[in-house]
Image (spheres, rainbow, N blue to C red):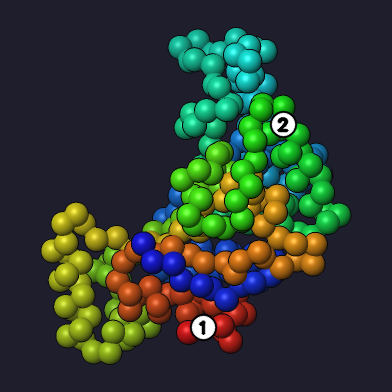
Amino acid sequence: MIAIELGAARVDEALRAVRALGAHRYVAGRLHLIHAFAFAALGDDAPDVLAGGLAWARALLAGASASDGTSPAPPERGQTSIDVSSRDERLWRRSSDAELVAVLESFWTPAPRSRAARGGLRAILDRHGIASPDHAPFDERAEDTIHPIAIDAGWELLGLSQLDPERHKGAIAAFGDGLAFESACFEEDAAIPPAVHLYELPAIGPVELLRGVDDGGALSEPLVVWTQGDPTYLDYVLRGVRRAAKLEACAS
């Protein structure tokens, strides 16, 4: 995958960019997984859009195994208890674009608004004996060591052959002429394994939530998306994302 900067260097810019990534006519689907710790760290004053995730996380962790192996509540029939220090897939909840943005905003908005969420996450990590790594936020070299991954978010785009000549004429025109677009469609259809066009946020763990933004609202590193697919198509879509997020001056 190839990393592409969106030009968002501050929290407000990053949140606008994340909203825009999922709010255009080329999105075919999304898969956002948010860890129970990220939800459970939020206080009762969390936005209404997070009420479902907060209730889910609290119920899940109430019946999960503690770090010493004890379980405060018996697991449901046919289910084994969840070890919260593990990578059990049940610790992640599939979430919406709105939930994704609201969780990021809860942790990244400069203090004092983010103080409760960050303090809650530190307390949860300490409670379960999970040490927060000391790598720099958004360091791609450390991605394999992030634990837990608090947010794993990405969007899949429509295939080129799925584009409508009228509704999606902008992306089609970006190829320059009909022959170039037809050639790209042919390559897509002939690809083994099947070609997909997608972009993902960087893996976000405790370090990124706790130290990814300074007190002035600046990200420690400009926001990037990791992309896979046809470069002409992705360039067109991401230029539109930048415009929608009012980051036009940062477009390449």
Q: Which residue is mark 2?
A: 126
Q: Quadrant of the N terminus?
A: bottom left
Q: Which residue is mark 1?
A: 251
Q: Residues within 10 Å of mark 2 (few under 14, many from 20)?
A: few
Q: Is residue 168 above or below residue 95?
A: below
The reply to whether residue 65 is visible in this rendering is: yes
Q: Is residue 252 above or below residue 8?
A: below
Given the image, on which type of amino acid does mark 1 rest? Ala
Q: Is residue 179 left or right of residue 113?
A: left
Q: Is residue 133 left or right of residue 177?
A: right
> In terms of image quadrants, where is residue 74?
top right
Q: Position of residue 71 (x, y in %)?
A: 63, 12
Which residue is pictured at 38% across the width and 73% down the height? 234
Where disc 2 sits, the SS reads: helix
Alpha carbon separation for disc pair 1 and 2: 41 Å
- Going from the N terminus, do you reach mark 1 or mark 2 first? 2
Where disc 1 sits, the SS reads: loop
Q: Position of residue 35 (x, y in %)?
A: 58, 39
Q: Is residue 185 left or right of residue 149?
A: left
Q: Position of residue 200 (x, y in %)?
A: 46, 58
Which residue is pictured at 57% across the width and 67% down the height? 223
